[in-house]
Image (tube, helix red, strand yellow):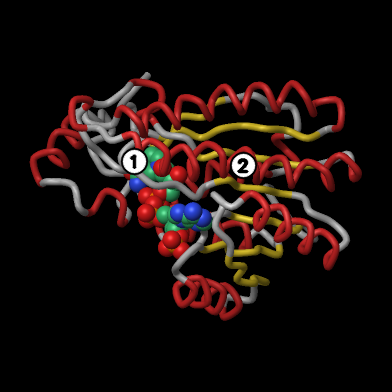
Amino acid sequence: MFRLDGRVALVTGGSRGIGRAICETLAKAGAEVYVNYAKGEAAAREVCEAIRAAGGKAEPIGFDVADSKATDEAIARISKEKGRFDVLVSNAGISIDQLLLRFKDDDLDKMLAVNLKGAIASARAAIRPMMRARWGRIVFISSVVGEMGNAGQVGYAATKAALLGVTKSVAKEYASRSVTVNAITPGFIETDMTASLPAEVREQMLKATPLGRIGSPADVAAATLYLCSEEAGFVTGHVLRVNGGLYL
Ligand code: NAP
């Protein structure tokens, strides 16, 4: 069940955290995985080595998703070299947290460029080969914060909520080509992004999570594998919560 043998997949922001776990999980299921990074080339190479050591196939691929030309070229290159492009997991994301009164336009622009425009640019490039093949899987990694809001995360919440509108629109546009498009909204997950949060915020998050633990990148990766599988072929435009019950 949930095999991806012969599929070619790209995970944006695959060098660390949730993205890394997704790369490893898709590769274990048989996909050939392109591990994207912006700055962390060494980390992306390390992910690929770990995948290969476990018997999987992976290649690092560096580009900044905020650069739509570079994103376009990278996806076109994979699709040309491999003759296919089956799965896009749009995971690259940044958060710059600040209360509304202190929130800077520039920080909003940075988050919009990566979290929203980057995701749209990746999907736009990926959809061409998927349409030709009449098969494709796109998964956007949004956030629980896009669904329920969070004090101090006005801009981040805006970009992640917007991704849900993107998911549903792209799902409607390409359903006739058997391309499914879904979103995952992770709750509080243990990665570099959350490691720097003050202890009291972590404690609050934990208390508010009915399942009583912080999520792991593997929790998000398992849900991603399902959405990318053949078995999820009748699931599109869906928002899958992987949040331990934090928001229902
Ligand atoms: P992370 O540990 O900070 O890793 C972020 C990843 O994104 C890195 O691989 C980074 O690569 C890449 N990245 C950042 N900017 C990029 C760009 N412009 N172009 C290409 N890659 C870029 O983050 P994470 O916690 O794993 O989060 C992954 C996704 O899940 C994000 O979209 C985040 O918003 C979402 N999410 C996280 C949580 C959580 O609790 N952790 C909860 C809900 C949603 P480089 O190192 O090369 O820059």
Element at label 2: helix
**Residue 183's disc number:** none
Residue for point 28% across, 33% down? 211
* Rendering coords of residue 164 (x, y %): 54, 25
Which label's residue is closer to the chain start, 1 or 2? 1
Q: Is residue 73 above or below residue 132?
A: below
Q: Is residue 99 above or below residue 110?
A: above
Cα separation between marks 1 and 2: 34 Å
The quarter of the rendered structure image containing the C terminus is top left
Q: Residue furthest front?
A: 105
The amino acid at mark 1 is Asp
The amino acid at mark 2 is Tyr
Residue 147 sits in which quadrant?
Answer: top left
Q: Nearer the viewer, mark 1 or mark 2?
A: 1
User: In the image, 150: left or right of 83?
Assistant: left
Element at label 1: helix
* Rendering coords of residue 57 (x, y %): 67, 72
Q: Which residue is mark 1?
A: 107
Residue for point 52% across, 59% down? 14
Q: How many marks?
A: 2
* Rendering coords of residue 173 (x, y %): 77, 24
* Rendering coords of residue 64 (x, y %): 54, 57
The crowd level at tag 2 (other Cα within 10 Å; few <14, some 14-19, many 20+) is some
- Asked whether the residues under the numbered discs 1 and 2 touch, taking CB atoms below 8 Å apart as contact, a structural biologist would say no
Q: Which residue is mark 2?
A: 226
Q: Is residue 125 above or below residue 13?
A: above
Residue for point 62% across, 32% down? 182
User: In the image, 140: left or right of 132?
Assistant: left
